[in-house]
Image (cartoon, helix red, strand yellow):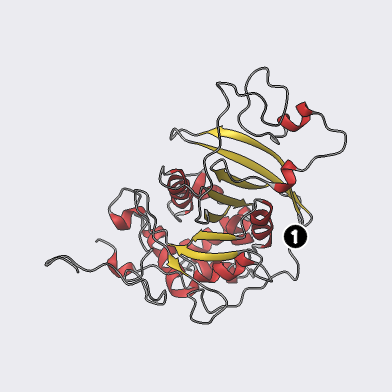
Amino acid sequence: ETPIGQEPPPSLLSPSFTPPSTPGTATPTTAGLRGVPVDSSIPSGGCGSKKPKLLPTLPEVECIVRARIPTVAGTEMFLHLYSNNVDNKEHLAIVFGKNIRSKSLDAVREGETEMDRMVRGAYTGRLFPGRTTSGIGPATPQEEQPPQASDQPPLVRIHSECYTGETAWSARCDCGEQLDEAARLMSLPGNKAGGIIIYLRQEGRGIGLGEKLKAYNLQDLGSDTVEANLLLRHPADARSYGLATAMLLDLGQPEVRLLTNNPDKIRAVEGPNREVVVKERVAMVPLSWKGRGGFRSQEVEGYLKTKIEKMGHMLDMASVPQ
């Protein structure tokens, strides 16, 4: 029973309600993320109505190197750099947690030495001065035992490069904030399943930085983000996610919880034959909407409004504090 005066918890029966009634529309500050169960195999599964253009087969990917990165937040992650047979870009996987490993990185390569394996990151445990083998040898004070694997799929964020939002302090979008928030959520002590940020080099929704800057000028002339792309004779969104699917499989993750406000992205990430299955969608609400810092600007509000009205993102601007 619900105590008198206390509201009952939100229903978990259907993901079809629009926020804020749907669980998973607020990114919490502590452990216990609540996501919306989704199923792209049925029309009512909460995965959007658009049919993404999927490649007939997944690209081939190979993890070339990984390295441990201690962060300014006091946590650490492993940065994986990938090559592929589709383009010459250096796509990345930012991995939180010690149980998530790359199959292609760990595979033995002809003629390599133990030092070669350690230098390219194909080692277990932790590197330390004087270490001579890539596998776990005699116990040392520096080496750590990996934590037990979680029964829950990891949190995953598919993030497309945004130089302006991540590096140039742009208030035209919330890309930098979303990247930081995804990393924070994946680093929470209660998140035993770990997390992966797939960082794809598809700037400007796939049109490149130069064309994106032209689109910004068109926005200052009165167009919204979708209209600006179309006026430049580009699709509203030219991104593809086959590389992300292939990278998730290489990292041994056939099931994931996806951090996104875009239900159409779910099917796009799963691959042509649902090689990866999204089990839950976890919303990413702008921090300023929740009164937790962040930033407000006329440009970002217009950007989010266009995402909601023209791209089907599941956010509720009616709940935004004025």
Q: Amino acid at mark 1?
A: Pro
The relative height of residue 240 versus residue 161 in the rendered view (above or below) is: below
Give residue 92's position: percent from left, percent from top.
64, 47
Taking the view exactly as shown, the residue that stands out farthest to the top is 130
- Image quarter hosting the N terminus: bottom left
Taking the view exactly as shown, the residue that stands out farthest to the bottom is 43
Taking the view exactly as shown, the residue that stands out farthest to the left is 4
Residue 63: in sight, yes or no? Answer: no
Q: Nearer the viewer, residue 145 or 7?
A: 145
The residue at the point 62 percent across, 47 percent down is 93
- In the image: residue 130, left or right of residue 300: right
Number of numbered tags placed on the structure image: 1
Give the SS element for disc 1.
loop
Identify the residue under disc 1: 59
| Quadrant in the rendering for residue 6 | bottom left
Q: Nearer the viewer, residue 49 or 174?
A: 49
| Quadrant in the rendering for residue 244 | bottom right
The relative height of residue 150 versus residue 36 in the rendered view (above or below) is: above
The residue at the point 43 percent across, 35 percent down is 73
Give residue 306's position: percent from left, percent from top.
44, 69
Give residue 81's position: percent from left, percent from top.
68, 43
Q: Nearer the viewer, residue 110 or 261?
A: 110
Taking the view exactly as shown, the residue that stands out farthest to the front is 138
The relative height of residue 237 versus residue 117 in the rendered view (above or below) is: below
- In the image: residue 282, left or right of residue 137: left
Residue 285: in sight, yes or no? Answer: yes
Give residue 149's position: percent from left, percent from top.
54, 47
- Crowding at dot 1, Cα within 10 Å, few <14 / some 14-19 / many 20+, comes out as some
The relative height of residue 113 versus residue 83 in the rendered view (above or below) is: above
